[in-house]
Amino acid sequence: MKALQFERKPLKYVAGYLAGSIVPGRGARYGPLRLADLDPPELPGPGWHTIRPRLAGICGSDLSTIDGHASRYFEPIVSFPFVPGHEVVADTDDGARVVVEPVLGCVARGIDPVCPSCARGDLGGCERLAFGAIEPGLQTGFCCETGGGWSTFMVAHESQLHAVPDGMSDEAAVMVEPTACAVHAALRARVDEGDLVAVIGAGTLGLLTIAALRRFTPAGRIVAAAKHPEQRRLATDLGADTVCEPGELPRLVRRLTGSLAYRDQLTGGADAVVDCVGSDESITEALSIVRPRGRVTLVGMPASVRLNLTTLWHRETELAGAYAYGTETLADGTRRRTFDLAFELVQEARLERLVTASYRLAEHREAIEHAAAAGRRGAVKIVFDLRSEKERNR
């Protein structure tokens, strides 16, 4: 089969890091990612199926890995060499179309009894990501045994597979997994009726989070910072009431809340801030514009950052992470699987329109550089297209 494989080669890793530091996405040209002819992965055990990807997305965690910027925290829960790709719509052997829920929790790992998080349906908190019947891997796409979506074949456990509704396009289906992340983040923000919510960042995850906040929370006004014109247009269309350029967000929140300011810190601020960037600068800004006893939710993946956290003590600010998905508690107290909510949101908000461009595996260098520069180039989601017979029969 054809696949893009990420290997553990330190010199290549350094080369990718240097290249990616100069031009985002350039790590695909010089780093340890290669297009290879591989044997299809074997089925790890009962309940596993071979599937054939149709579309597979490129996400921020993929880009940070390829450019060598991912945190070393992940090393014990990743196994090499792995095939990336966890945003996947695929065909099963019997011809059904499915979306993959990539977290490799206890059920997929054959662990019985399951850990407390998996028992609650909160897969993002699984405690057994490095144990069980398969090699370590926090998700499909970061595990050497499962393969990933950037290939013509991979394997998935039946507990990971969600049937795609009739009439839903592949482009819509490939948006379900990132939308599930955004739904979980929106609900993790614990928004109360009428709250002012600020969203930092308007890439794929930021835009999807805006849509999820508007659909599944009782937020009052949603304001967002977006760097590029197309991002600002989409943020408004998906539910933001006011969209500004990044440097204008503190001033906007100050005006809307009637806050004063001392240096860069507002005296009041937004009730909730959702940071979809995850950098030193974005987290610092989030802490400076949230009100005392407000909540900052980190959705963008931070690595090693340098922060002044005095505000957490002085203003009793809550700082929370939002990772993956599982089962959510809605405002009316009902419990529903995140992926079910994501399927609904993708269809209601027509999120397939965020799929901007597709590439063949052989064009992976161009695809990854496009994804890394998506906002500047007026794009949102870049995907690999494996639907052609020539690709799928390799």
Image: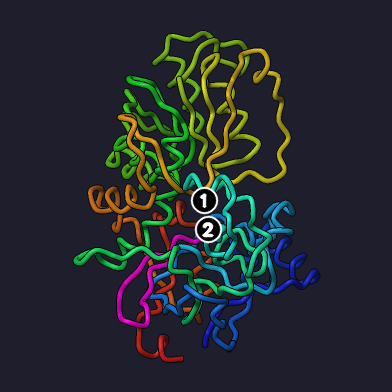
Q: Which residue lies furthest to the right in this view?
A: 11
| Residue 208 screen position, x and y as percent | 38, 46
Residue 210: image quadrant is top left
Mark 1, secondary structure of its residue: helix
Please tell me whether residue 95 belongs to the stretch shown in magenta.
Answer: yes
Answer yes or no: do the residues labelled 1 and 2 have beta carbons within 8 Å?
yes
| Apparent side of residue 193 relative to residue 5 in the rendered image (left or right) | left
112 or 217: which is nearer to us?
112
| Residue 293 screen position, x and y as percent | 54, 16
Residue shown at 40% from the left, 65% from the top: 161
Disc 2: which residue = 103
Q: Which residue lies furthest to the front in this view?
A: 113
Residue shown at 68% from the left, 61% from the top: 131
Disc 1: which residue = 123
Q: Badge 1, how many Cα within 10 Å: few under 14, some, many 20+?
A: many
| Apparent side of residue 300 relative to residue 176 in the rendered image (left or right) | right
82 or 106: which is nearer to us?
106
| Residue 176 screen position, x and y as percent | 37, 56
Mark 2, secondary structure of its residue: loop
Q: What residue type is labelled 1?
A: Leu
Relative height, residue 203 to residue 297 (above, below): below
Q: Give the range drawn in magenta.
A: 88-103
| Residue 323 screen position, x and y as percent | 54, 45
